[in-house]
C-alpha cells in the first residue's frame, strides 16, 4: 500500500513538473504550423507580421500569456492563443527563439535620426537611449525582460511604438515592464518613431 502511494505521488509530481517544463523546439515546431502563415516557417515573418525568430523565449511566452489574459489586445492574436496551454506556449517560444533572425535594411533618409535616438535618446524630451535596455546590437537582455529588436520589421516596430504611444499597448501586470515603453513612446514624435523603427530593422 505504502509503495503504491509513493508511486502515485511520484507520478503526480512528474506530471506537475512536465506541465510547467521548459519548452522544446521539436515539440514547438509541430505546434507552430498554424503560426507560420503569418510569422513565417522559421519565424522571420511574412510581410509586415512581426518576426519571432531569435526573440528571447521568455519574452515570446510572456506575450502569449498576455494575449491570453487580455493584458495585451490584438484581435488576431487573441484568437490564436485561445486554445494554447502553458506548455504549448513554452514549446512555441523555444521553437521560434531557436531560429536566426534575418536582417532588413535601414532607409537612408531615416538612418541619422534613427541612430541618434537609438544610441543617445532625445534629452530635450527625456527620451532615454534605446540602447540602454535593448543593447548596442539590439539583442535585448533576456533576464531583464528587454526584448530583442534586431532585424524586426519596420512596419511592426512603428505600429507597436504607436500603440505604446497612444496607450493601446502596455502591460501592467506585476511581471511585466510594459509601462516603461508606454512612458518612453508617449514622449516621441511620429518622425522619431518612424526613424528608429527603420534603424532597428538593420541593427545587429
Ligand atoms: C493570421 C496571422 C497570425 C497568426 C496565424 C499568428 N499570429 Fe502572432 N501575431 C500576428 C500579429 C498581427 C501580431 C502583432 C500584434 C500587435 O500588433 O500587437 C502578432 C504578434 C505575435 C507575438 C508578439 C510579438 C512581439 O514581438 O511582441 C507573438 C509572440 C506571436 N504573435 C506568436 C504567435 C504564435 C505562437 C502563433 C501560433 C500559435 C501566432 N502568433 C499566430 C499575427 C498572427
Ligand atoms: C528602461 C528600459 C527600456 C528602454 C530605455 C527602452 N525600452 Fe523598449 N522595451 C523595454 C521593455 C521592458 C519592453 C517589453 C515591454 C512589454 O513587456 O510589453 C520593451 C519593448 C519594446 C518594443 C516591443 C518589441 C516587440 O517585439 O514587440 C519596442 C519596439 C521597443 N521596446 C522599442 C524601444 C525603443 C525604440 C526605445 C528607445 C526610444 C526603447 N525601446 C527604449 C524596455 C526599454
Image (spheres, grey):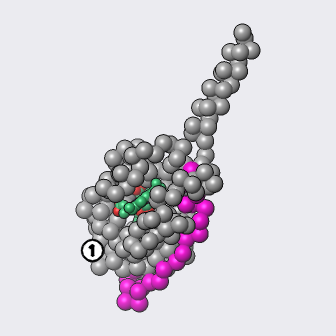
Residue drawn at the location 36% of the way across and 74% of the way down: 155
Residue drawn at the location 60% of the way across and 51% of the way down: 27
Can the viewer see residue 154? yes
Q: Quadrant of the N terminus?
A: top right
Provide the residue span drawn in magenta: 91-114
* 49 to the left or right of 13: left
| Quarter-of-image position of residue 110 | bottom left
Task: Check if residue 103 falls in the magenta segment.
Answer: yes
Residue drawn at the location 52% of the way across and 47% of the way down: 88
Residue drawn at the location 71% of the way across and 21% of the way down: 7
Residue denoted by label 1: 189
Residue 192 is situated, as x and y percent measured from the top left of the image, at 32, 77
Front residue of 139 and 26: 26
Can the viewer see residue 120? no
On screen, 36 above or below 59?
A: below
Residue 145 is situated, as x and y percent measured from the top left of the image, at 50, 55
Mark 1 crowdedness (10 Å alpha carbons): few <14, some 14-19, many ≥20: few
Q: Residue furthest left?
A: 166
* 199 to the left or right of 182: right
Q: Secondary structure at mark 1?
A: loop
On screen, 94 above or below 154?
A: above
Give the dominant element type of the magenta stretch: helix, strand or loop. helix
Amino acid at each position: 500500500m505504502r509503495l503504491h502511494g509513493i508511486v502515485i505521488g511520484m507520478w503526480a509530481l512528474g506530471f506537475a513538473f512536465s506541465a510547467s517544463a521548459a519548452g522544446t523546439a521539436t515539440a514547438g515546431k509541430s505546434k507552430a504550423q498554424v503560426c507560420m502563415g503569418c510569422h513565417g516557417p522559421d519565424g522571420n515573418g511574412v510581410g509586415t507580421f512581426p518576426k519571432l525568430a531569435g526573440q528571447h523565449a521568455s519574452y515570446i511566452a510572456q506575450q502569449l500569456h498576455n494575449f491570453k489574459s487580455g493584458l495585451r489586445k490584438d484581435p488576431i492574436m487573441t484568437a490564436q492563443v485561445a486554445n494554447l496551454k502553458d506548455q504549448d506556449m513554452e514549446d512555441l517560444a523555444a521553437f521560434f527563439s531557436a531560429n536566426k533572425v534575418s536582417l532588413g535594411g535601414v532607409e537612408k533618409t531615416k538612418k541619422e535620426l534613427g541612430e541618434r535616438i537609438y544610441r543617445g535618446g532625445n534629452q530635450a524630451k527625456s527620451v532615454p537611449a534605446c540602447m540602454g535596455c535593448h543593447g548596442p546590437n539590439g539583442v535585448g537582455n533576456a533576464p531583464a525582460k528587454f526584448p530583442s529588436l534586431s532585424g524586426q520589421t519596420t512596419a511592426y516596430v512603428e505600429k507597436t511604438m504607436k500603440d505604446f504611444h497612444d496607450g493601446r499597448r502596455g502591460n501592467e501586470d506585476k511581471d511585466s515592464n510594459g509601462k516603461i515603453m508606454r512612458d518612453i513612446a508617449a514622449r516621441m514624435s511620429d518622425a522619431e518613431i518612424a526613424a528608429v523603427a527603420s534603424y532597428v530593422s538593420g541593427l545587429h
